[in-house]
Amino acid sequence: MRLGTRKLLDKAFSALGMVSIALMAGALLVILVPIIGKGVGAVVFKATVEHRRILLEEFDRGNPEDIRAEIEATDELRSPVYGYFAAYENEISGTLDPMADIFRKIADESEHYGSKIARRMRKYDEAKNYEDREEAIERAYNLIAYSDDKDRFAEELAEIKSRMEEGEKRNKSFIEVSDAIRDLLGPFPGEPRPTLVRKRYGKTRWDRAEIAIHDVLYHEEWDYSDPSGMGVKREFPRVETFQGTKLEPLFAYVEEHAKEMLNPRYTFYTGFFTTSPKDSHIFGGILPELLGTLYLTVGAMLFAMPIGVVAAIFFTEYAGDSATVKILRTCVSTLAGVPSIVFGLFGLAFFINAIHIPKSVLAGSLTLALLILPTIIRASEEAIRAVPHTYREAALALGAGKWHTVVSVILPAALPGILTGSVISMGRAAGETAPIIFTAAVSVGKALGPLESILQPTPALSWNIYNLCTEHEAVDEIRHVQFGMVATLILLVLMLNLIAIIMRARISKKLRG
Amino acid sequence: MGEFIASTIGRGILFLVASTAAIAVLFIFYFIARDSIPFIRSEYIEQFFKSPDWYPSGSPPSFGALSLFIGSALVTLGAAVLAVPLGVAAAVCLSDVLPFDLRQLVKPVIEMLAAIPSVAYGFFALVVLAPLLQNDGGRVLSITWFAIAIPVGLLAVIIISDLLTSKVEDEKRRAVSRVVIGAALFGLAAWGVAAAGMYFDSMKVKTGTNALNVSFILGIMALPTIVSVSEDALQAVGRELREGSIALGATRAETLVKTIIPAASSGIFAAVLLGIMRALGETMVVWMASGNAAQIPEPIYNYLEPVRTLTATIAGDMGEADHVTGSARYHVLFTIGLCLLVFCFITNLASEWIVSRERKKLRGE
């Protein structure tokens, strides 16, 4: 090979290494930037008046007078919307009258069914709202359409049928529009208070509100005419359906005044960390999950750290190189290699089914403790080994016993290193999901106090991230909560790691003098 | 005398505490095995390794885990294909190419990558990567293909034309023939790369939650393990080998490929085993983003199909399995767990043995 080619290969080889390092850094960025960027959106966002209304009504927060005044002002602006709806309802109830007239004519002519039809029409006249009237017409129609008179009145029936179909089509779009408005602004004035909390309020975030406004203005249809590919989404303005009716001005009004009706303002929502969720995370914060993760992590550390440090002391100071010790060491590395889901299975089979601890923080932390034990043992061993031999010799020369030396000289010197390793494994415990699925985690739960949590299952960040983005009934609706949770968990873990990195840098500086 | 007793008791206590890990390992094996025995003894065990039909809730139920084993194998293999070359290259770069200061900057990146919780990786795969693959799958594949194929292709063209012409004696004729062969090869390669790129670009990805997505994420997750363990192995190879090789006129790449990497090969192999174990044992990512379809992809190397893995099955099916009465649905999950456990145990022992053998060799025993 030519020297030039060899040099090129040499460069290419280095480049491959650089590229893979760049890829790792890139992957880190690609993962962290969107998650943390969107996660911030759970806390800092443009909140609408509905957000402040919820804070006041469901969480007792905010200044009642200001918020009431704001609600009144926005309600004022919303009243035209409801005005259009009322006018339209009036208008369409008139569209049934021609059909009623036809039936009255049939009632006069038909010998067999005349009286029955007349009774239906009396009901029609007495009915107060559109739906009841529609029902009366429909029943009258069914009466004739399935009778022996159906051929005699075929012409009339056909006309009524076509009018009914037209009305149905319009009604369907009308119901869609009113549902879209409910989605955007909350229930109509005078409607009974919905049982589901999510239906009681309009859109609390302006970004979600913009989507809801779009839903008011357009309806979408999926076109599957292309047999080879997937369906294509097409959008049509709803205003086309209501051309010439009293509802037509609604769309222009919503488009123009939506912002004033919702009054979005930038908000720093600390409640995301300090309040419990309402209506499966559609409103409120992530306090129960945060606390759950905290309890599980601290619990795991409480069990794993003493055992881990003592084991490390044994391995470094007391154990020789005997066969037993070798087996013990192999067991530590075997434990480190057990897949996390198998820890979960073990927790279920042993802690819960065999010794009957209930599914709880206790069972979860014990399982997690086993998972992080090898990491703590190894880190502590390394830290103890890093203590210079002179320390040991000096202590022994002063007449201290072995145990005394370990406790009063070596452990204090190794403590920063031990803590570094422990902090890293704390991050690992906080982020693990698989071991707690069967032993500790539940999807919905209230924020628990430290003591009551011991024997109760708890929501936890890691589990609820999974749960919210795969099993929640309104996955897209709560993207911000999911991103907020993931960002919280990642920042928590990275912060712990950062602490460890800084501590380690300090130690290495100290050791270098 | 009293002191002796005290120290013996103290030692005993220390020993007991230190054997917690050993006791835990024993308990894990015992309890996982105990709960899988009812399944192993049942009539279903025959189909377990042979049948690809996983319908644990059907009547009669079918517990064929073959598709799960293949699913796990596929995503682990995919992760290894990505992570092993990149990881080893990065480790070599860290230990032998990069200056010290830069290395100190790269290490935290690797540590952070290792620290990100698996559920966060799973969330990324499900919420960011899967829609991207589903909507612009062809584009993503073709861009990736070009990014890999263009530099590799160029390099291959140069090397092959150089190798083919190295026998020609006359200097002038050699240069000319090199250019001619190079140009011809370049044309061929460019056509091949472009055609393949067009093919990838026209591909339609049915679902974003598939084996490719999961393999990619698992590869990223396995990288830190592979990099840090193989870097340790490379560092352990002494300076003498490096200096000797360079003194003989080898370039740095030749030194690394022909001398250092072979010397550290067992350590690197252990690193690869550990990385693969991490990918195989991973639960959340595969549960969230693999599509969870218990099927063998058609054809089997089709990474754009959804798969279901062993770990995800344990996590996903336990909720439905009735563990109070202990049905076959419950015990089969423990059997899967036992398979994972045994595999990881053997792999772990193997890597441990390899590393200790290497240590002995380096110490010159």
Image (spheres, rainbow, N blue to C red):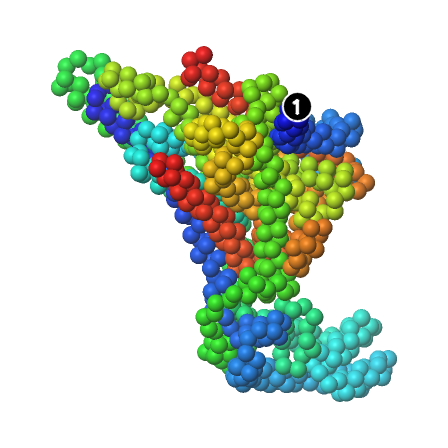
User: Does the image show residue B165?
Assistant: yes
Local SS, label 1: loop
Horizontally, is B314 left or right of A333 in the view?
Answer: right
Can you say whether B114 is above or below A455 in the image? Answer: above
Q: Position of residue A126 (x, y in %)?
A: 77, 87
Q: B128 above or below B352?
A: below
Tell me if residue A250 can be seen: no
A148 over B187 or under it: above or below = below
- Please state the total of marks drawn on the protein image: 1
- Please tell me whether residue B36 is drawn above or below residue A225 in the rendered image: above
Classify mark 1: residues with Cα within 10 Å, few (<14), some (14-19) or many (20+): few
Residue B259 lies in quadrant: top left
> Residue A58: where, in percent of width, then height?
63, 72
Identify the residue position indicated by label 1 in the image.
B1
Quadrant position of the C terminus of chain A in the picture: top left
Give the letter of the chain under mark 1.
B
Q: Taking A265 as reference, is A472 left or right?
A: right
Q: In terms of depth relative to the viewer, which is nearer, A499 or A178?
A: A499
Nearest the camera: A435 or A224? Answer: A435
- Residue nearer the viewer, B252 or B229: B229
- Residue A52 in percent (x, y) is at 55, 74
Residue B117, percent from left and from top: 52, 45
The residue positioned farthest toward the left in the image shown: B172
